[in-house]
Amino acid sequence: MSIARFWRETPRRYNLGGSKCTNCGTAYFPPRSVCPTCARHRESIGKMVPFQLSGEGEVYSFTTVHEPAEGFEMQVPYVLALVRTVEGPMLTGQIVDLAPEEVRIGLKVRATFRKLREEGKAGVIHYGYKFAPVEETAVRPPGGSRTAVGTPATPEGDRAPA
Amino acid sequence: MEAGIVSYGAYVPRYRITPTEIGRVWGADGESMGQSLNVHRKSVPAPDEDTITISTEALRVALIRGAIDPQQIGAIYVGSESHPYAVKPTATVVAQAVGATPHLTAADFEFACKAGTAAIQTCLGLVGAEMVRYGVAIGSDTSQGAPGDALEYSASAGGAAFVIGRDHVIARVEHTVSYTTDTPDFWRREGQRYPSHSGRFTGEPAYFRHETECAHHIMEVAGTTPADYRHVVFHQPNGKFPQRVGKQLGFSESQMRYGLVTPYIGNTYSGAALIGLANVLDHAGPGERILVVGYGSGAGSDAFDLTTTDEIAKFDRSFGRPVQSYLDSGVELSYGVYAKFRGKIHMGGS
Ligand SMILES: [Zn+2]
């Protein structure tokens, strides 16, 4: 993909910039200029506004890739998934930070910012969204008990989200 | 000083490797190496992570926690010694990725491991002078030691982002000072893949002198003693140096408890002291005084005398992971997979 084309798609790849029909409320990604959901499409003309997806969603379907696309050799096997966002649009993206055998339909995921590919050793580096499992974010209250630092922690392995 | 920390976020990649595993490959006693460094595991970035992605993840967490409109950010500075490009700023990608562009200033900072604290000082100046509403300072790295070098046992990846502002400050900056000299303890020349260091010289005249002089200086300016602080955070190239410098200065283990994270994730360079500070803020309630003394080779220290405010009790930490979860979790890699992830395997071809 050319640098110019990638650059034009930056709002989409970096910030999940889609569009929303203010006539019927449907969200789109990639953005559309006319709403196919409205019974009379022309009623949506001029009513489509930029809309940023939150990046939250769940795995709708997925496949494990063993024959890597160029630039993905270091990540084989990796998972490509269809993610149904909470706002509605379906996105395709790589699932990271989870072993392929742990990916399942319905898994809650959140968009994460990663390198997509590099144009060789001297070329430009492309960045964009992938999806990572939503981790548990329990926060201990201030002053809560924990292991003192200085005591070697036993590696506990990965805590896969329940 | 009215300006202070308004929000913060930290990010550490998911993978880990132990000194024992590294030593196994190089015929060294990695276990005792790890014990002498007080580093039990170090973090390893995935092949699709770098300083730009780590910085972005940390900042996104900070912006959501603080409910900060990215368009109100007037400056973003990213401190690192592993910027992905030699020429092309990390900060512009980060600014775009969080939706802060185009009406802001952005730049990359470099000063070994203290580029992030230098960025905080710069933001304090801009915010204090009311030139910007919010300034963002990030310290983040994906550092590498040459294969088999002592640095390989500790050099890791991670970062933290701090939003500096005047409203809803959760930690007020009472004072900040620096201590800077020309000291050749650690360097990397242009075009060289791995850094060089002057062995034992990196200790006494470099790290220890700058940390202690800077700590003494800020306590003199502030009129404080170690007993006035609930928490202390030092730069932590390994788990031993900060313990030793803390003891020399008269701080107790309990004051260092939350600020010392390197034993569990390794030395995140520009991220190290800042992830330690993030861990302190994860646990702090109102009215707690914090001393932070960073260090960067080459050499210099930046110190901050902070006090948490009543705002920290209302601060929403529920988005993003607490630092403790990064210290406790992770997926361990073999040296082979680690070498593949870090580009240490010669792939043939050109
Ligand atoms: Zn519509």
Image (cartoon, coloured by chain):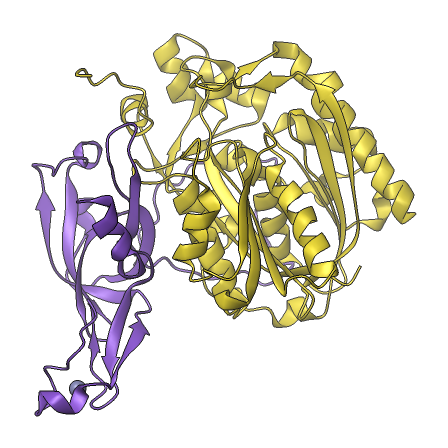
Chain colours: A purple, B yellow
* In the image, residue B6 above or below residue B178: below
B56 relative position to B168: left or right: left
Q: Quadrant of the N terminus of chain B?
A: bottom right
Camera-side residue of B35 and B127:
B127
Relative image position of residue B329 (x, y in whole percent): 41, 44
Quadrant in which the C terminus of chain B is drawn: top left
Find residue A25 and report its image quarter.
bottom left
* Between B88 and A146, the one nearer to me in the picture: B88
Look at 39% across and 19% down and name the residue there.
B22
Q: Is residue B118 above or below residue B185?
A: below
Picture coordinates of residue B150 (x, y %)?
51, 15
Q: Residue at x 32, y 22 (%)?
A: B335
Measured along the vertical axis of the image, is residue B181 above or below residue B235? above
Q: Is any part of residue A152 visible from this angle?
A: no
Looking at this view, name the residue that lies furthest to the front: A4
Out of B74 and B216, give the one closest to the viewer: B74
B266 or B2: which is nearer to us? B2
Locate residue B336 relative to residue B65 in the image: left or right.
Answer: left
Determine the image quadrant of residue B348. top left
Residue visible at 42% across and 36% down? A155
| B319 lies left or right of A28 | right
Residue B97 can be seen in this image: yes
Q: Position of residue B104 (x, y in %)?
A: 53, 58
Q: Quadrant of ligand 1?
A: bottom left
- The image position of residue B199, as x and y in percent, is 61, 11
